Amino acid sequence: RIRPWSALGRRSTEPEGTMAGDSDDAGRGVEGEEEFAPVTALSSPPRPLPRLGLKRVSARTVGAGSGTVELDPEDAGIEEAIQRIERKSFLRDGVIPEIQSLLVLPPQQAKEAFLSLMANYSLVAMLILASLLGSALDPLDPDAYPDAPKCVAAFNMMAMIISCANLFATCVFVLESVIVESTPAERIHSVIARADGVFGFGVNMVATGLQGLAPLILVRAWVSGLDDVQCVVLTVVVALLYMMMMDTYFVHYQAVSPFQALRWVKLFAMHRYQAGPAHAAVDGLVAELRHLQQKRDKTLTPEQLGQSLGKFFSNADVLLADEAVFLRSLEADAGGRLAPTMEKLARQAFTKVADRELEKIAEAAADTATSAMQS
């Protein structure tokens, strides 16, 4: 039987005639035929076909379902992005921190997070555009407000500027989403490293709308028929609410996200900006990115691996043992990032030693329980 190419995936590991999670008749084949599960039924995506003409990739995952990140040290865009982060001048260099922080994520997760950010920003831009498009296309008539012609002109101009800015932001985010959607996951880090310019333009356009709506409402109030005292009171109340919002939010932002605070808190609430935590967060991210740029070529002998395991478990409670911490200590002993197969060996050895120690604890607990029941 010949099946279409699109229906081929990895070979099913379920019992004969059954696909993972499907009905009994879903994947039944004929005798002597190799069975394949459809792509939609896979728990993890199939390995991509080799791409001709690409000698290197900027980042890739190692092994099926692995979340290991490897940044290409020869990618000029990634190197330039790390250097701009390292300088800690986000406003001058145009660094968008929420974008560059995605470089430490595995490729598929980074791609999904990037698309999610653009979708959220474009949604806000479209909401602002929808709320002001009527005022921009049908501006106020100055003759209807003869007492405040300048306020009417200011309102019309502001509504048109904010509408255009958010229209342009929506266009940029939608077009960039199309590009990112069609970009292979293994190249996404190179795209993210170069995205500050286009993403920064979109964010600034959305910020124009968010920061300009309150003044626009106040200008409209001054031509709405309220007397001067009412307009002054309204302006003071709105200004106080605005300052309360900005102060409350950016105090929280500085506390929970000091890396991103280096741009946004410094820009909108300088009196709340704390350089110490922000610089420490930048140094930590740069160290992680430099680590991910290292080639994965370090290996250890079985004796060295055994010594590292013994040293780790002698200084750590087996019930609190963390595999990630062990791998980092192993990389420190090896002087760099472990080769993929070496990392797989280290994980297996860690699991075996941990299981052996846990078995001893379980036996001791069982003996104690038996003694307690006998007494």
Image: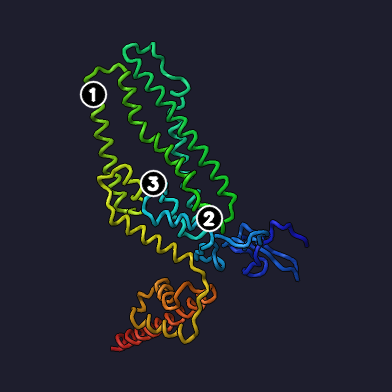
Task: Answer left or right for 247 relative to 99.
Answer: left
Instruction: Give the residue at x 43% y 19%.
Output: 139
The answer to which quarter of the image holds residue 61 is bottom right
Q: Find the distance from the CA under tag 3 to the CA under tag 2.
A: 22 Å
Task: Please name the residue that numbered disc 3 is placed on.
Answer: 92
In the displayed structure, 208 sits above or below 120; it is: above
Q: Position of residue 155 (x, y in %)?
A: 38, 23
Residue identifier under label 1: 232
The residue carrying pointer 2 sits among few (fewer than 14), some (14 to 19) or many (20 or more) residues within 10 Å by Cα, namely many
Residue name at image x 43 percent, y 28 percent: 161
Asked if one can make out residue 21 in the rendered structure from this viewpoint, the answer is: no
Quarter residue 308 falls in: bottom left
**Crowd tier of the residue under label 3, counting other residues whose Cα lies within 10 Å: few below 14, some 14–19, many 20 or above:** few
Q: Position of residue 39 (x, y in %)?
A: 63, 58
Q: Nearer the viewer, residue 64 or 4?
A: 64
Residue 354 visible in the current orientation: yes
Residue located farthest toward the right when viewing the structure as drawn: 1
